[in-house]
Structures are given as structure tokens and as C-alpha cells.
Amino acid sequence: MRDERTMFAITLVLICVLAASLGQVILKQGMSSIDKINNVNDLVKFKAIINILTNKYVILGVILYGLVFILWMAAMSTLDISFMYPMLSLAYLITTAMAFLFLGENISMIRWIGTVLVVAGCLLISRS
């Protein structure tokens, strides 16, 4: 049985996975509300940079990523990275589901199957 410290660290990793998935969806929402960036010239325009940096969804997404960073560092102090990193694959599944539910993205069956296979493989690695 895992000790209390290890279980706390695993809980932090799972919170990181959820927060990172939510952060991705929020960032996508923010970027969908500004002009499309189709090339490097669009990206380096002052207006585009200002639109990105002042978008409330982008700001919230970045804040979530900051939280994830802090929690991830805390978990790293206890767990092996070779155990932790495969658990991030759960974010693929959660982010895909959130994109479907909250952004209305059309996700093909082959994409769902591929996502589940990636997660299954990573979970097998984490069981070792």
C-alpha cells in the first residue's frame, strides 16, 4: 500500500492533468475569439500579440498552467518522473472529451480510438 505522502503526490498529478486539460480548452476558447493566425507575419503583428495577451480566456489559461507548474513540482519531489509523465496521457482523453462537450468539436471515431490507445499504453507503463 502506498504511503500518505505518495498518495498526496498522485492526487497532485491528477489535479495537474485536470487543470492542464481545462487550461487547453480555455486557451482554445480565447484563441478562437481573436483573428486567426495563419503565418509568422500574423503572429508577430503588434495587434495580434496585444489581442492574445489581453484576452481574458488566454490569461485564465496561463494562470491555470502556472498552478499546474507549481503542483507538478510538488509532486516531483516525491514521485519518479517515469511514473508521473505517463499519467499526463490522461489529459489527452480529458481534453478531447472537453473539446467535444464545451467547444462542440466534431471528433471522429478513429480519433477517439487513437486517444484511448495512447492512454492505455501510457497507463501500462505507469503500472510497472
Image (cartoon, helix red, strand yellow):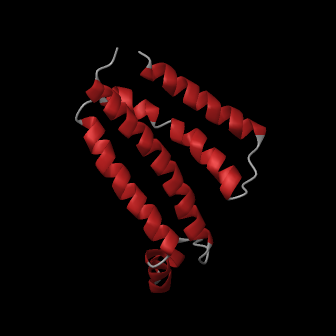
Q: Where is residue 101 in the image (x, y as percent from the top left)?
A: 69, 52
User: Residue 38 placed where, x, y %?
Assistant: 60, 71
The residue under the point 35% across, 14% down is 1
In the image, residue 1 sits, relative to residue 113, either above or below, namely above
* Residue 57 visible within the image: yes
Establish if 59 lies above or below 81.
below
In the picture as drawn, the residue positioned furthest to the left comes out as: 77
- The total number of labels drawn is 0
Which is nearer the eye, 7 or 105?
Answer: 7
Q: Residue at x 29, y 26 (%)?
A: 4
Q: In which quarter of the image is residue 109?
A: top right
Image x and y of residue 22, in percent: 52, 53
Image check: 84 left or right of 121?
Answer: left
Using the rendered image of the protein, determine whether residue 79 is visible from the camera's viewpoint. no
Q: Residue 2 lies in what quarter of the image?
A: top left
Left/right placement of residue 128 relative to residue 90 reads left
Residue 49, image x and y in percent?
A: 45, 78
Which quarter shows the C terminus? top left
Q: Residue at x 45, y 82 (%)?
A: 50
Outermost residue toward the front in this view: 4
* Residue lying at 29% horizontally and 50% vertically, measured from the top left: 70
